[in-house]
Amino acid sequence: MKTLLLSADETEKAARIILDGGIVAMPTETVYGLAADALNGKAVAKIFEAKGRPMDNPLIVHISDISQIKPLVREFPEKARLLAEKFWPGPLTIILPKSDMIPDEVSAGLDTVAVRFPSHPVAQALISVSCPLAAPSANLSGSPSPTSAQHVIRDMDGRIDAIIDGGSCDIGVESTVITLAEDVPRILRPGGVTAEEIYAVIGEIEIDRAVTEPLAEGQKVSSPGMKYKHYAPKARVILLEGGREKFAEYIRLNSDDKTGVLCYNEEKDIFSCICIPIGYENDFRSYARKMFSALREADDKGCRIVYAHCPSKEGMGLAVYNRMIRASGFRVIRL
Ligand code: AMP
Ligand code: MG
């Protein structure tokens, strides 16, 4: 199939493709999403095929107004209203019991649906002129999420109907996913809204163990996405935990011309190997923005091993930690 490359003002063209049952990659403030009509099971099935995504991994439904969530869910509890009013439009996904409108392809057979109202103007415009959109990240399953149209073209050219180029994504990491379908609200995936910010609005929350820990064989998961290999470049990623001097010394002793380092901007002159800056130290928003493109760049530059700082688990650090620990296959060296 020929993949059309559309500009940000061609959302009407994209909407027509979607309403005809096609699939289109769109920019959002988190990462690029691969969108289909959320109420058309056949169209949604094409997303799984294009990505090579396991069929048991449900999709997030994207809306362009808070009121659009009502027909999609069986209940809209007070905590959902508080979170929606505080964080929508924005990088927060809320899971609630689903209504009968949601096709099985979207919920992957679960009794719940994940819903988000993105803040990106192009995503909003596209939803407004089409319909609620089911959209996972627009990468091949398992590889780093796309934060530019070029990343999407790399993975998806010839596999999808169109790509809307909306430039680079501002947040760079996927939305925070929280379930309100159980007794205590629980974060299933950390992202652009921090646990601390959510706690300030609704009080007690849990953070799912799978956010920071590897899954034991056969362990039951709340979010099927956590079962799968994720975010991994071809290079072997190793996280190093320790201060700058130990980090620099370890890399000096263990690198060759195929070694890459995801370093802080402040460090970019101290390494002789391939150096990919990922933002300023202690600024996990900048690390998040650069992380996925840095992992792709490491592959482009032919790195066999990539060392990176092990992020903290505070604030936005938790979202970065969750992606990097998976990208590294849980390989952490404590210096
Ligand atoms: P992605 O589409 O790549 O942003 O991933 C969406 C994430 O949300 C995956 O980890 C899914 O498993 C998770 N997810 C989507 N819908 C649900 C749901 N109804 N219940 C639990 N997790 C969900
Ligand atoms: Mg994804």
Image (spheres, helix red, strand yellow):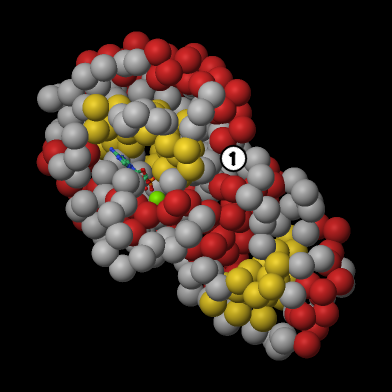
115 up-or-down from 142: above or below: above
What x and y, as percent, mark residue 301? Answer: 61, 74
Q: Is residue 250 visible?
A: yes
Q: Is residue 133 visible?
A: no
Type of residue at label 1? Ile
134 vs 295, left or right, is left
Location of residue 310 by image quarter: bottom right
What x and y, as percent, mark residue 226? Answer: 37, 54
Residue depicted at 54% across the width and 77% down the height: 236
**Which part of the image, by quadrant, shows the C terminus?**
bottom right
What x and y, as percent, mark residue 175? Answer: 48, 38
148 vs 110, left or right, is right
Residue depicted at 38% across the width and 62% down the height: 215
Residue depicted at 59% across the width and 36% down the height: 194
Q: Residues within 10 Å of mark 1 (few under 14, many from 20)?
A: many
**Which part of the image, by quadrant, shows the N terminus?**
bottom left
Residue depicted at 79% across the width and 53% down the height: 281
Determine which residue is flagged by label 1.
171
308 up-or-down from 123: above or below: below
What x and y, as percent, mark residue 23? Answer: 27, 42
Label 1 sits on a secondary structure element that is: loop
198 up-or-down from 172: above or below: above
268 vs 195, left or right, is right
